[in-house]
Amino acid sequence: MPTIDVTQTHEVIDALFANEVVGIPTDTVYGLAAMPNRTAIKRMIDLKKGRDKDQPIAILFSELEKLEQYGVDFKKIQSLGVFWPGALTVVTSASTHLLPIPVVTEEGTVGVRIPDNEIAIQIIEKCGGVLAVSSANHHGDKPALNASEVAQQFGDELLVVDGGVSPGGTASTVVDMTSEIPTVLREGEISIEEIKRCLSKG
């Protein structure tokens, strides 16, 4: 597997613009990253053997305004921006014409997050501010926490940025903001109480 140093991220960025899938560190686990288009997403799904092709893939972004180009309703979720960068995934509405399924669901929803990882942010920013990212593992296997674990699962199939060991730990909290009353779908590192306090201020 071509593992590259963080000083050589230009190679990964070039690969992403060529619609290839790459491995990057995040603030939770290592992820498979791809440009949010049909060609790149199909390659990601093919790599993640056994994964349901309709299972949603979140998008990671560098700043809220970057979501507008993909028809994502970012204004509705601005109140939760205080938790970013960090372990919060927000489900909001998005255009089904500008993002491919399963990044956007058939119902027109998408999960978005800003990761608290400097390497990931730099790569995302240089790729236009938005990347589709799924945990680096085959279906049923544990997500990789370092570049070596990505190698064990994917061999020479993709470039991986070696950003050291990702912390793993508690998954992100997931909040659905697509309806009038926000719903916490999964409580993770950020508590339901923290989310409620934030939304009550908005």
Image (cartoon, helix red, strand yellow):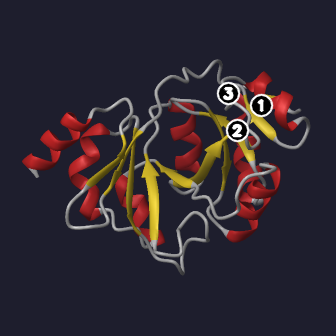
Above or below, 131 against 167 in this view is below
For marks 3 and 1 on the same chain, the one whose residue lies earlier in the sequence: 3
Query: What residue would you read off at disc 3?
Result: 6
Label 1: which secondary element = helix
Task: Residue at 52%, 48% (x, y): give it.
Answer: 125
In this rendering, would 107 be left or right of 126? Answer: left
Q: Quadrant of the N terminus?
A: top right
Q: CA distance from mark 3 to mark 2?
A: 18 Å
In this rendering, would 186 be left or right of 126? Answer: left
> In the rendering, at what x and y percent does residue 32 appear?
69, 44
Task: Residue at 46%, 62% (x, y): give it.
Answer: 110
Query: Dot 3, how many residues are within 10 Å of its Cα: few (below 14), some (14-19), or many (20+)?
Result: some
Choose top left, top right, bottom left or bottom right for residue 5.
Answer: top right
Q: CA distance from mark 2 to mark 1?
A: 6 Å
Marks 2 & 1, CB-CB < 8 Å contact: yes
Please name whichever residue, 49 or 98, is drawn nearer the observer in this view of the structure.
49
Query: Dot 2, how many residues are within 10 Å of its Cα: few (below 14), some (14-19), or many (20+)?
Result: many
> In the rendering, at what x and y percent does residue 75 appear?
26, 63
Query: Dot 1, how many residues are within 10 Å of its Cα: few (below 14), some (14-19), or many (20+)?
Result: many
Q: CA distance from mark 3 to mark 1?
A: 16 Å
The kind of residue on which mark 1 rests is Val
Label 3: which secondary element = helix
The kind of residue on which mark 3 rests is Val
Above or below, 163 against 140 in this view is above
Query: What residue would you read off at disc 1?
Result: 150
Choose top left, top right, bottom left or bottom right for residue 42.
Answer: bottom right
- Residue found at the far bottom of this picture: 97
The kind of residue on which mark 2 rests is Ala
Query: What residue would you read off at disc 2?
Result: 136
Marks 3 & 1, CB-CB < 8 Å contact: no
For marks 2 and 1 on the same chain, the one whose residue lies earlier in the sequence: 2
